[in-house]
Image (tube, rainbow, N blue to C red):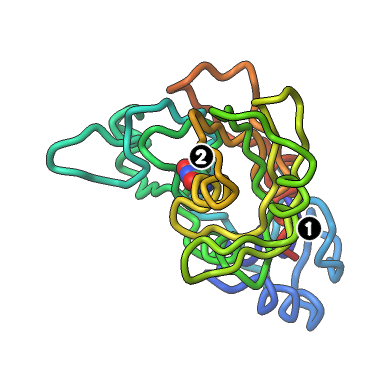
């Protein structure tokens, strides 16, 4: 994990506050003064003004959300992604960073890191999300051009995006916004219909295809760093 992230987690700072603190001095990593926010820390001992810093219990899960469950923390009547987790994780205050529709599948990040979720979801960060969509009609070049340059999804014109046709009725679409039912409404705006939707990439990370629908795993440090680089 990057040193600035480690310090931010341990002291409850934003990452830019942590970077300032690191640059001001007073931190040591395994006894050596540390002033580079991008330095890598893993199992080393990190001290600030002689006090040991311990990262709080932050958890980052990659889930392959199955269709048929809600991506919310609780619902009185319907099954949610939290119902797929064991008690230990449920007690650690996890929540989904972003939404997928009930009938959508794929990469859902679950975390208890509010600061990170806030940054990932901030429209300013333009975090990329790639979806694999099965369509009910063939997708032609003209419709791809229209989708890529912005379509009116009733009251809102979408920002430029990338669309790649894989088969006549199968496409990949990468958007940097997260309006309600955005991808479905975009295809509807060009006279098509999304029959199924799966998020295959999020914030610079690809869904681990070894995760079956409903399975999840913790992100490794390298993957978390990749997300942090994406939102920098
Ligand atoms: N766009 C949609 O329409 N649905 C999703 O679940 C995600 C993006």
Q: CA distance from mark 1 to mark 2?
A: 33 Å
Q: Quadrant of the C terminus?
A: bottom right
Relative side of 91 to 45, left or right: left
Mark 1 vs 2: CB contact within 8 A: no
Relative side of 229 to 184, left or right: right
Q: Residues within 10 Å of mark 2 (few under 14, many from 20)?
A: many
Residue behind mark 2: 108
The numbered mark at residue 202 is none
Along the line of sight, the residue nearer the viewer: 20 or 70: 70
The numbered mark at residue 29 is 1
SS type, badge 1: strand
Instruction: Kindly indicate the quadrant of the structure image that contains residue 82.
Output: top left
Relative side of 166 to 153, left or right: right
Q: Residue at x 45, y 50 (%)?
A: 181
**Could you tell me residue 142's position as x and y percent?**
77, 46
**Could you tell me residue 5's position as x and y percent?**
67, 60
């Amino acid at each position: 994990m990057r040193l600035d992230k480690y310090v931010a987690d341990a002291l409850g700072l934003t990452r830019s506050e942590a970077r300032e603190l690191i640059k001001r001095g007073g931190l040591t990593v395994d006894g050596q003064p540390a002033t580079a926010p991008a330095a890598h820390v893993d199992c080393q001992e990190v001290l600030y003004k002689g006090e040991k810093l311990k990262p709080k219990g932050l958890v980052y899960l990659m889930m392959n959300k199955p269709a048929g469950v809600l991506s919310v923390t609780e619902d009185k009547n319907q099954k949610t992604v939290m119902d797929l987790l064991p008690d230990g994780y449920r007690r650690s205050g996890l929540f989904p960073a972003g939404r997928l529709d009930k009938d959508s599948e794929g990469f859902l990040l679950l975390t208890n890191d509010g600061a990170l979720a806030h940054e990932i979801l901030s429209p300013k960060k333009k975090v990329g999300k790639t979806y694999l969509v099965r369509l009910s009609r063939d997708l032609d070049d003209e419709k791809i051009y229209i989708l890529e340059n912005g379509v009116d999804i009733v009251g809102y014109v979408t920002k430029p995006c990338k669309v790649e046709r894989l088969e006549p009725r199968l496409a990949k679409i990468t958007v940097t916004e997260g309006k309600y039912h955005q991808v479905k409404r975009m295809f509807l705006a060009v006279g098509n219909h999304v029959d199924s939707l799966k998020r295959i990439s999020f914030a610079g990370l690809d869904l681990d295809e070894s995760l079956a629908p409903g399975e999840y795993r913790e992100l490794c440090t390298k993957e978390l760093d990749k997300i942090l680089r994406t939102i920098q």
